[in-house]
Image: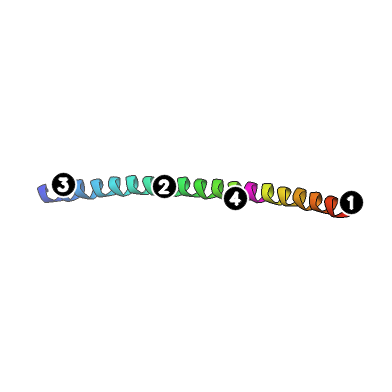
Amino acid sequence: MFGKRIIDKIFNEAIKASKTLNEEYETMRVKNVTRIVETHQMMNQKLNEFQKHKEETETAFRFIRNK
């Protein structure tokens, strides 16, 4: 009986530790995905700003050339 209690206690602690690790892993995964999404949004914003600036510059050069 004494050996069974020790084994049950060790098993229960292992299950608790596994659940804790799974929760920490999920939290880390969500944080990473959030960071990746934010990075992609920032890159798209910078791309849009660059394209707008490029169009404005090209328009200005066309205007100067056509004068």
User: How far apart, in angstroms, are the residues tagged by discs 3 and 2?
Assistant: 34 Å
Start-end of magenta stretch: 43-47
Residue 64 percent location from the top left of the image = 83, 51
Q: Is residue 18 left or right of residue 30?
A: left
In the picture of the structure, the residue carrying the numbered disc 2 is: 28
Q: Nearer the viewer, mark 3 or mark 1?
A: 1
Residue 15 percent location from the top left of the image = 29, 48
The 10 Å Cα crowd at callout 1, few under 14, some 14 to 19, many 20 or more, is few
In the image, 11 versus 55, the foreground residue is 55
Disc on the earlier residue, 1 or 4: 4
Disc on the earlier residue, 2 or 4: 2
| Numbered mark located on residue 41 in the image | none
Q: Is residue 50 left or right of residue 59?
A: left
The 10 Å Cα crowd at callout 2, few under 14, some 14 to 19, many 20 or more, is few
Q: Nearer the viewer, mark 2 or mark 4?
A: 4
In the image, 8 versus 18, the foreground residue is 18
Q: How is the image coloured?
A: rainbow
Disc count in the image? 4
User: How far apart, in angstroms, are the residues tagged by discs 3 and 1?
Assistant: 93 Å
User: How far apart, in angstroms, are the residues tagged by discs 4 and 3?
Assistant: 57 Å
In the picture of the structure, the residue carrying the numbered disc 1 is: 67
Kind of residue sitting beneath label 4: Met
Residue 23 percent location from the top left of the image = 38, 45
Q: Which residue is at a point 85% across and 50% down the rendered structure image?
A: 63
| Numbered mark located on residue 5 in the image | 3
SS type, badge 2 = helix
Check residue 40 for magenta coloring. no
Q: Nearer the viewer, mark 4 or mark 3?
A: 4
Q: Nearer the viewer, mark 1 or mark 4?
A: 1
Q: Which residue is at a point 39% across and 49% down the rendered structure image?
A: 25
| Numbered mark located on residue 43 in the image | 4
